[in-house]
Amino acid sequence: MFRRTSIGTSSFSDSSPKNSRFSAASVLSMSRFKRLGNVDSLKGFRKETEKEISVPHGLLQAARKSGQLNLSGRGLTEVPQNVYRLNVDTPEEVKQNVSFAASDGWWEQTDLTKLLLSSNQLQHLSDDIRLLPGLITLDLHDNQLSSLPSAVGDLQELQQLRLSNNQLASLLVEVCSLKSLRSLTLQNNLLESLPEELGQLENLTELDLSSNLLRELPVGFGCLTTLQKVNLGHNKLQCLPDCLSQLKNVKLLDCSNNQLTGVPPSMSEMVGLEQLYLRHNRLCFLPQLPAPSLKELYVGNNQIQQLEEEQLCCLKAISVLELRDNKIKGLPDQITSLNTLTRLDLTNNDVSSLPASLSLLPDLKVLLLEGNPLRGIRRDLLTKGTIELLRYLRGRIEEKPDGAEDGHGGLALPSDARINIHAIKTLKMLEYRDKQAENIPDEVFDAVADHGIVTVDFSKNQLTALPHRLHELFPTLADVNLGFNRLMSCSPDICHLFQLTHIDFRNNQLTDLPLEMNNLNKLRSIILKYNRFRSFPRVLYQILSLETVLLGNNQVSVVDPSNLMKLVHLSTLDLSNNDLLNIPPELGLCTSLRCLSLEGNPFRTPRAAVMAKGTDEVLKYLRSRIPT
């Protein structure tokens, strides 16, 4: 059986009226290349231009075999005509009577299904794109397209269309007729509205509309019932439509960086919703969303002042609750209803006290409180991490003396190590601290086999290197405390702990961090106080997930603000008590910072009077000193 492919069909159809003009154009084009002296006087540089944008013959030949053509990053200003006609024109080998090998029969060549044109300088796409009806993937991201040809609607096999980082002011209605489309990415364009016909994309599972100028969503948006992942971040949305309730299969919804003051109650009908991002909006209250599958809720950088009982009690399945950079003054006792909570982020709020009942949350592993005016809790206790803080709070509600449980639940091992088995089983926490040990005994790691340890505390020992068996905990380990040891270097093996969100290396002898740490793309906070760093660790500039960096009491003499600006989530930076002789004014452009500590450095400006006014005023002062 013959396949309906490119070259085979073209040889039988070139004589038809429909294709005669293409055949003539092809012959004319070939003649221009052969007759070097015969140049079109009206277009004197046509010969050089066509040569410049042509595609190497070898690439086209390979594309006919594989069905894939990658022309990304070639500086193209337009798509070469021989790309559009790849499945229409007869290959040069046939025209020149070149014999094909047995495995290269030209009649067996395949249609083009994947065309990658990203990172070029394309300003338009020709209607000839319809000559590639077999396309499944069309990648046009990172170009200069301001519009699309209506012929795109003829690509009925298309499943993935990438149009991000262009200059599209509107979405072509014909795109909405692509019934097979599964993924549509349009981030970083100039879209102000969407066509009502968008709802016709009945098989769409992924839609990215972030970083546009959208003020509202069409009613037809609710017809996209197969959607699973939606990104609406960085737009100008002031409200979300009730039609979102029809999106029963959406698992991730990102509405960060908009102008939302609330979310419609109907969103609780999004029964499949697992992750909801509402960062950087204008919310004054925590959304009341009894979505049964909601596991992660991110509402940082809003204006929330108070948490209500009904708002908390409906979060039946919540695991991660981010409330950082709000104005929350306290936590209600009803926080204990969040039985599935593993991470609570209250960084940079106005919390002055913590309820002791917080320690009763059975799965809480990470509690972030940096930047709160907490009273009644010693500052040194706050710096010891989640484990110590929860133990302290638990001690306030237990009638028996602190440590009685350890004597009952401990496990004596041959090495005289005592392991809190209760903490291992219920808190998923491995603790072997304050032993002055030079190595962590193998028995300690043997005791936690198959327990899914999330938190490790090996602080206050005499460790000179990372415990060699630490990597065994990589599937679940999120929080590591190796403070108050004698570490002189950090092994690159730490990069295998890809679930890490928090590392505490305070009070060691570190001078640098391994570049392999850039793989820790979930890392949010790192504590490096009281070490021997002379400059800001280079690798930290590459960990874009970082929110908190504590580097006080080192010997840091230089910091690069241009790289710091890449850390768009960084809100807390402690550089106090270092050797900074000057503060670069460009540091003021790091507008994500909410808490910047610079005291104890030998610089002269900003002066103490400016420093005393707080982070916002310091950043404002620095910006004012940037040379214009």
Image (tube, rainbow, N blue to C red):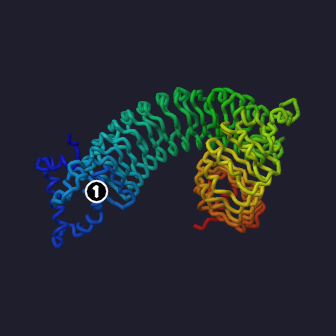
Residue 279 image position (x, y, % from top left): 59, 42
Q: Which residue is farthest right? A: 401
Q: Residue furthest front?
A: 414
Whole-percent x, y for residue 443 in the image:
74, 43
Q: Is residue 464 left or right of residue 253?
A: right
| Count of numbered badges drawn on the protein | 1
Horizontal and vertical percent for residue 583? 69, 65
**Residue 225, quarter of the rendered image:** top left
Q: SS of the residue at dot 1?
A: helix
- Picture residue at 73% right of the left edge, 60% below the top: 488
Residue closer to the observer: 264 or 71: 71
Per the image, the residue denoted by label 1 is: 60
Of the residues shown, which amino acid type is indicated by label 1? Answer: Leu
- Residue 148 horizontal side relative to residue 563, left or right: left
Residue 610 showing in the rendered view: no
* Quarter of the picture holding the N terminus: top left
x and y percentages locating residue 177 in the rendered image: 32, 37
* Front in this rendered view, residue 473 or 223: 473
Neighbor class of circle 1 (other Cα within 10 Å; few <14, some 14-19, many 20+) is some
- Residue 273 visible somewhere in the drawing: yes
Toward the bottom, the furthest residue is 37
Q: Is residue 308 above or below residue 544?
A: above
Give residue 614's quadrant in the image.
Answer: bottom right
